[in-house]
Amino acid sequence: MIEFTVYGKPAPAGSKKGFYNAKAARVIITDDSKQSRPWKAQISDAAAAAMGNRALLGGPLELRLAFYIPRPKGHFGAKGVRPSAPDSPTVKPDLLKLARAVEDALSGIVYRDDSQIVRELLAKCYGEPARVLVQVRSLFELRATA
């Protein structure tokens, strides 16, 4: 299993846009979100460090992601978190776009392609500091130990 934490404000993957580049004679895909590029780079760096010299994971994979975002100041009163404050963040960015950014950043570093992910467990919670906890494991390993 590969496991690591990336600190920083999680950024969603934006909508993809494609355009044809005549000089390159191919379609170029770009990401709308300006914040996602540095966030993905940070995830890729942490993933590369966690992988070390290991080969890319093969076969079907399980991906677990837990995103932690700070509570807004309005959730706090004189005695701490207000009873009326929600337990979970139901605000943008949405969880699937956050996960897509991580999936994209791990491709070619932890696994060959994100199509290998056959099981995902995702969570978006309040917590300090802002971060994402990443766990990737091969389902072959689970079958071998069962």
Image (spheres, rainbow, N blue to C red):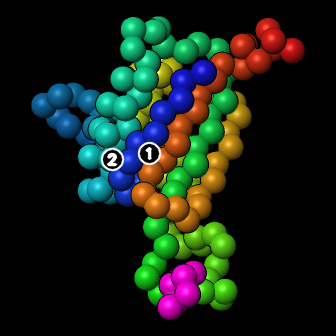
Residue 17 tag number: none
Please state which amino acid type lies under the numbered disc 1: Ala
Query: How far across and how far down the image is residue 125, in percent?
Result: 59, 61
124 and 112: which is toward the camera: 124
| Residue 122 higher or lower than 130, as above or below | above
Q: CA distance from mark 2 to mark 1?
A: 8 Å
Is residue 28 rendered to the left or right of residue 46? left
**Element marked by disc 2:** helix
Mark 2 vs mark 1, foreground winner is 2
Query: How far across and how far down the image is residue 56, in percent?
Result: 48, 13
- Look at the image and tell me whether residue 14 can be seen: no
> Residue 27 falls in which quadrant of the image?
top left
Give me the residue at 60% from left, 72% from top.
Answer: 90
Residue underneath mark 2: 39
Give me the residue at 53% from left, 47% from top.
Answer: 99
Query: How far across and how far down the image is residue 69, in percent?
Result: 48, 63
Give me the residue at 21% from left, 28% from top.
Answer: 25
Sooner in the amino-acid sequence: mark 2 or mark 1: 2
Please state which amino acid type lies under the numbered disc 2: Trp
The outermost residue toward the left is: 23
Q: Which residues are magenta?
A: 75-81
73 and 79: which is toward the camera: 79
The outermost residue toward the right is: 146
Residue 101 tag number: 1
- Look at the image and tell me whether residue 24 can be seen: yes
| Residue 103 higher or lower than 143, as above or below | below
- Asked if the residue at tag 1 contacts the one at tag 2, i.e. Cβ–Cβ closer than 8 Å, the answer is yes
Give me the residue at 54% from left, 82% from top.
Answer: 80
**Element marked by disc 1:** helix
